[in-house]
Amino acid sequence: MPSATRLAFTGVDQDVIVRNRRTVERETAIRLADFVAGTPGVPAVTPVVRSGPAARATARHALVRHCDLVVAGKRGAFELDEVLLGSVTLRLLEQRDRDLLLAPPESG
């Protein structure tokens, strides 16, 4: 989904943007809940969907929920990716107010 800022800039009505965001959040929450339910060993996970820039939304949620640790998946298919971090990861690291665990992609 294009960002709300871009949509507003192109003249899309704010009510349409809000309805669209809510629809996407609802559909994403359903897909995430299905994923978690089908994943063995994660019964204590409560999936949460938030809109906005990923690092900012994640950091804000962690702050509100008083999380001690943020776990983020790291994407990367090349050896060079091991030394390079994505922009979301870097922004999460910049928060510096809690621990961050980066989980590498599943191999195979």
Image (cartoon, rainbow, N blue to C red):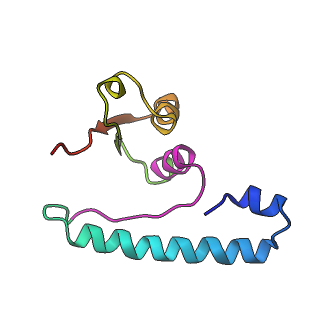
Q: Tell me residue 74's x, y (percent).
A: 34, 39
Q: Tell me residue 24's x, y (percent).
A: 55, 72
Q: Along the horizontal axis of the image, is 104 left or right of 75?
A: left
Residue at 65% across, 60% down: 2
Q: Along the horizontal axis of the image, is 39 left or right of 88?
A: left
Q: Magenta span covers which residues?
A: 44-62
The C terminus, quarter of image: top left
In this view, 5 is above or below 37:
above
Residue at 83% across, 62% down: 10
Residue at 52% across, 61% down: 50
Q: Tell me residue 25's x, y (percent).
A: 52, 71
In this view, 74 is above or below 10:
above
Q: Quadrant of residue 101?
A: top left
Q: Nearer the viewer, residue 106 or 41?
A: 106
The N terminus, quarter of image: bottom right
Is 79 one of the magenta-colored residues? no
Q: Tell me residue 61's x, y (percent).
A: 49, 53
Residue at 59% across, 75% down: 22
Is 51 one of the magenta-colored residues? yes
In this view, 68 is above or below 97:
below
